[in-house]
Image (cartoon, rainbow, N blue to C red):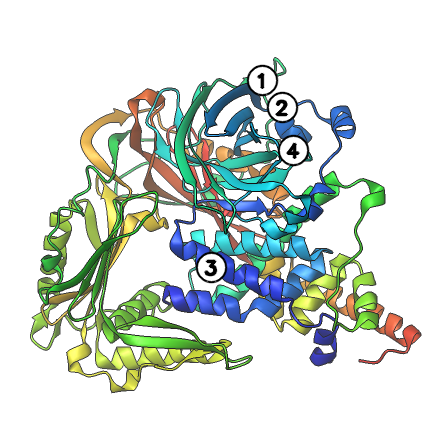
Amino acid sequence: MNNDKLNSMYGQTPESFENRIRYTLAKAESVPVRRAPLRIALIAAMALVLTIATAAALFSSQVAEFFGRPELNDGKIAQIGESTIIGDLTYTLDEVVYIPEGLYGVGRITSAQEGVRILSYDAEPADFSAEGLTILHAQVTVEAVAVDGGEMLPLSASGYDMIPQDDGSVQFAFILPRSIAVTEGTEYTLKMNVSSRKAKGADDMHRVDTWQVSFTPVYAQPTAAPQPQATEVSSVNGVQIIAPDGYQIGDALPVYKAQLRTEENTAFFSLDPAAFNTSGITQHFTRDTYYREENYVFSDEARLRMTGITLEYTEYDGEYTIFYKLDGQSPDGPHPRPAFSADVAELGFSAYWEHPQEQLEKIELNGFTLAEAQSLAENLLSQLDLDDYQLSYALDMTKERIARLGSLNQKIMESANFYTDKTWDYSAASADDEGFFLLYKKQAGGILVDKGDMYNELRLFVANGQIRYVMIDDLYRATGDSYLAENLLSAEEMIAAFNRDNARRERHRISRPKLHTLTLSYMPMRAENAADGMIYAPVWYAEYSFTDTVPREGWAWYSALDGTLIRDCYTY
Amino acid sequence: MTQAEFNARIVAMQDTLYRVSTTILPQLCDREDAVQGAIEKAIRKRHTLRKDNALEAWLTRILINECYSLLRRRKRELLFDDVPEREVAEDANPDLYQLFTSLEETYRLPMVLHYVEGYTVDEICRMLRMPKSTLKSRLYRGKQLLRKALEKEEVFL
């Protein structure tokens, strides 16, 4: 079949589509990507809104009506109607529904003034300018959630939508997916940011305020929400159990009190940047975001970036520009170019994930030993109050290994539709470039925490007596305060818990899932009594295969305390 | 892979993203919303990408799911009389496009991914979560249907 002919049926990719991609990427670089607009408010959207008459016949909940999901009527519903007034705008949270997938909410933003059109920040005022109205941009985002009087926890993901109404107001909606912060409870408190600004070209007037609303959702029907159908229980013998030596599934395990790392209690900001680099600081700046971020640029171009939960140290070397092969004439940049040491660190990370045949061979490189590298790394981690991490992987990045992995990396770059004007010659790596790639994983009581989550591993590249690269994300720490949880689920009960959720997996097009491995781990979550805050509790990391002719792998986390599904791979 | 390279690879595959979203969503505005949602999800979940060389297939899969989510929402919202016409670029081949879009989506999407975007059968199986035998039969059947339609209209590939 002729690809060119088939391609021709689509024509050129529209400029608006290209611009949307670039806009999304640019926006992500300037603010933390914690919300995802479900839809941009365009004129065409108004034609797609359900009529009230039709909706009333099908839905009784505003939230169910907005999302077009009648099953939301079966969730716990809170009809709130609370408002806050900021300037000329009134923000009203109308209704919130809880179902096991998370919290869904709708509300309105209205203006006290006549002749005003309210739009989302993403909307193009020109699309509405013919109306002759004054344009105001406004938005509501949810920053954190508290359940049953417990800790106010930040959200890791949320989605938003805004639909302009005929009267100039806007209806907003949000989805807060189930997560550590969003769990089942009785009373919820949402901490929201409400903001507004005049349209571009007018005098700048940007207001941001915080708004908290508490509510208690209840079932409209006396019976509980429907549960997925149970399926056949698999044989215990077919499931591999991975746990510390001597541990029998079902035995008691400690539950630790967990502490959230915040801007106030983190040790990151108190660390002297000279601990990384003594060449002198040429720039120190903060970024204007919802959280504190400190940036340092050193005399030798290295950079240090810190937030309450993230620390990145990278050496840089000049600048580079990206060109697109398709036209070769749209340079993107220049961007600061990470130094060769940063590239070597990334090669080490790629070996960890993709090249199991690359194994540690040398424990000394040019008179610098692995033990010395580990000591340097752990001294730094101790200063950063990260003593709950243990070395999990180490790789000697010799010049031969750098050349070998670099060659593989180059093939990937050559197959991409872009190129840069400055590439590394990995075959020219010398003894000066050699060092140790180290990867540390968080532990709780000697057991790995939350296998696979980015917040529980950190990596460094240490060469010639110096730390050359650091990448840390750390959200919670397990404290010494703990109690022993007894009566944990048996193997049969864990497998039954897994199989109970297969109907839901089938709805997400994961057919015939078969559990094959359970690995003991720990995960931060809310205590049973949410007012007690966060805990590190034992969980089982369940790995399963699905489909019959093409093997594929899925994964999920289950509470070892009560078999609750915490997260499954189909939710990304 | 640096952030700049991650972004560059996404920009470099914009034609693929456009064609895949066009296969599922009839309206340009919806395709733009879907690609924005997909990219934002990809950025948030970048740490779950195990292999850098799988970025394109991974993002395509996210986009397909975003398109289906949007399609489900739109289908609930529309009254029958309001079903929009499929938008097509000005320089597109309208005859071929018309024929191709007359195929059921069951056949259309796998054919776009394989014959237009060049993904392998294994990659498409992972994206669409279907067995290899099912995919192969859809590709075969889709080609047959398209060939029949093309012969009728005297449009040659």
- Is residue A571 left or right of B156 when viewed as pictured? left
Instruction: Indicate the amino acid at tag 1.
Output: Tyr
Disc 4 versus disc 2: nearer the observer: 4
Q: Is residue B157 visible?
A: yes
Is B68 or A248 nearer to us in this picture? Answer: B68
Q: Which residue is mark 4?
A: A66
Q: Chain of mark 2?
A: A
Label 2 vs 1, first from the N-terminus:
2
Residue A406 position in % (x across, y down): 33, 78
Q: Which residue is mark 2?
A: A74
Residue A348 position in % (x across, y down): 28, 68
Instruction: Indicate the amino acid at tag 4.
Output: Phe
Label 4 vs 1, first from the N-terminus:
4
Q: Which mark is residue A25?
A: 3
Q: Are marks 3 and 4 in contact (CB under 8 Å)?
A: no
Task: Say which residue appears at 35% left-offset and 33% top-offset.
Answer: A153
Is A168 or B60 nearer to us in this picture? Answer: A168
Task: Say which residue appears at 51% left-offset and 20% top-offset.
Answer: A82
Disc 2/disc 1 C-alpha distance (Å): 7 Å
Is A113 or A227 nearer to us in this picture? Answer: A113
Q: Residues within 10 Å of mark 2 (few under 14, many from 20)?
A: many
Q: Chain of mark 1?
A: A
Disc 3/disc 4 C-alpha distance (Å): 28 Å
Label 2 vs 3, first from the N-terminus:
3
Disc 2 versus disc 3: nearer the observer: 3
